[in-house]
Image (cartoon, helix red, strand yellow):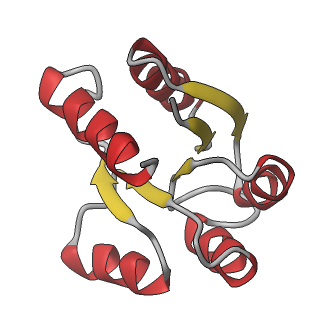
Amino acid sequence: MAKILIVDDSLIIRKTLERIVTEKGHEVIATGKDGIEGVDLYTKHQPDVMFLDITMPNKDGKECLKEIIEKYPDAKIIMFSAISDEEEKSRCISLGASRFINKGENLMQEENKEKIVQAVEELSQ
């Protein structure tokens, strides 16, 4: 069972992700709505896996990612975004993200749920 942190400015996305991972036996230990909370919550909880949106108010996901990776180089962070271009994905991976998952049209589609759960399980081993 992985301990998971979810940071996304959309309450609907946070709740949906939480439902997907808890149905598979993982625990969401905290959620946040922007990059400032993301850094604070990561530091406080040091989760096994973090889901991090790119586009958020106050501090975006890339800034948050850089700050966390500087302090915790082994952090397992899944960038989770509606932005799907390859350049953005490559930039996030080069900054230290472990994975990049596109939010897609419907998170609750079986294919999307499987991608999410598979990433959590691979990274939390």
Q: Which residue is at 60% across, 71% downward?
A: 65
The answer to whether residue 101 is left or right of residue 76 is left
Q: Is residue 71 above or below residue 120?
A: below
Q: Position of residue 124 (x, y in %)?
A: 46, 48
In the rendered structure, the answer to whether residue 58 lies left or right of residue 19 reads: right
Furthest-left residue in this view: 111
The residue positioned 63% from the left and 66% from the top of the image is 60
In this view, the residue in front, 121 or 77, is: 121
- The x and y percentages for residue 105 are 22, 34
Residue name at image x 69 percent, y 71 percent: 68
Find residue 18 and report its horizontal and vertical position in percent: 52, 24
In the rendered image, the residue lying farthest to the front is: 125
Please tell me whether residue 91 is drawn above or below residue 100 in the rendered image. below
Q: Residue furthest top?
A: 23
The vertical placement of 101 against 27, above or below, is below
What's the residue at 70%, 43% (across, down)? 33
How many labels were placed on the picture? 0
7 to the left or right of 96: right
Residue 61 placed where, x, y %? 58, 64
Tell which of 11 and 125 is nearer to you.
125
Q: Going by the image, does 49 lie left or right of 69?
A: left
